[in-house]
Amino acid sequence: MPDLIPTLHGPVFEVAPRLLNAVLRYGEVGVRLTEVEAYAGPDDPGSHAHRGRTRRNKVMFGPAGRLYCYFTYGMHVCCNVVTGEAGDPSAVLLRAGEVVEGIDIARSRRPGSSDRDLARGPARLCRALGIELADDGADLVAGPITLTPGAPPSAVSSGPRVGLRGAPERPWRFWATGAPTVSSYRPAKAL
């Protein structure tokens, strides 16, 4: 099995595409990642760590290989993989993937969804896996949630991050070209 931690070191916009085709596992469910977004901490107005360390974002400050979980819209959990050196709050949002293990369990957590949509979007991905806010800070090497690097996809596309007002022009969203589970791009709504 490839070692996760070396995969996570380097500038976050270089690390993010390395996570494509990695498999995130929790219990009996595994999701192969097809779409991710990079967030570079204090130098990135789109990052939760842009304004410094808080109780909510403290996991982003390291060490690498931790899961950073948070609520979005007050009710949906999203998760990121912490990257880089300790103290450098960079992370990769896990945007979408394909359920490759435990599909019946994922279906039971997302009733009425097509198999393509089970983990298509960051909150759907967490729900399919059973990831909750209590999993914030989980060690992705020691488990119970693990991330196993995979072979790089044959082609990688990049573009702007989804729904972002801060630094929306940065092409730090990466996806496996042609993967049907990649989410649709939506710019931020005008204020």
Image (cartoon, rainbow, N blue to C red):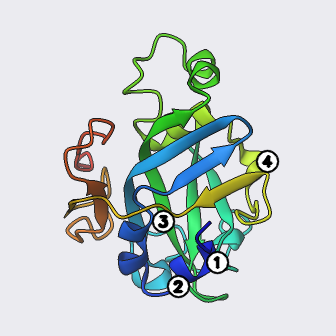
User: What residue does disc 4 label?
Assistant: 134
Report whether 27 appears left or right of 122.
Answer: right
Instruction: Tell me the SS state at disc 3.
Output: strand
User: What residue does disc 2 label?
Assistant: 9
Q: Residue at x 22, y 68 (%)?
A: 171
Asked if residue 104 is positioned above or below residue 172 in the image, the reply reads above
Measured Cα–Cα span from mark 1 to mark 4: 18 Å
Regarding residue 44, the answer to whether it shows in the image is yes
Dot 2 or dot 4, earlier in sequence: 2
User: What residue does disc 3 label?
Assistant: 92
Measured Cα–Cα span from mark 3 to mark 1: 11 Å
Measured Cα–Cα span from mark 1 to mark 2: 8 Å
Q: Residue furthest top?
A: 112
Q: Residue at x 74, y 67 (%)?
A: 55
Asked if residue 52 is positioned above or below residue 69 in the image, the reply reads below
In the rendered structure, which amino acid carries the disc numbered 3? Val
User: What residue does disc 1 label?
Assistant: 64
Q: Residue furthest front?
A: 1
Q: Position of residue 44 (x, y in %)?
A: 39, 78
Dot 3 or dot 1, earlier in sequence: 1
In the rendered structure, which amino acid carries the disc numbered 1? Ala
In front of the other: label 1 or label 4? 1
Report whether 48 appears left or right of 158.
Answer: right
Q: Residue at x 25, y 39 (%)?
A: 184
In the rendered structure, which amino acid carries the disc numbered 4? Ala
Other-residue count near label 2 (Cα within 10 Å), few / some / many at <14 / 14–19 / ≥20: some
Q: Residue at x 47, y 27 (%)?
A: 118
Report whether 175 appears left or right of 16.
Answer: left
The quarter of the rendered structure image containing the N terminus is bottom right
Is residue 62 or residue 76 the one in the foreground? 62
Regarding residue 76, the answer to whether it shows in the image is no
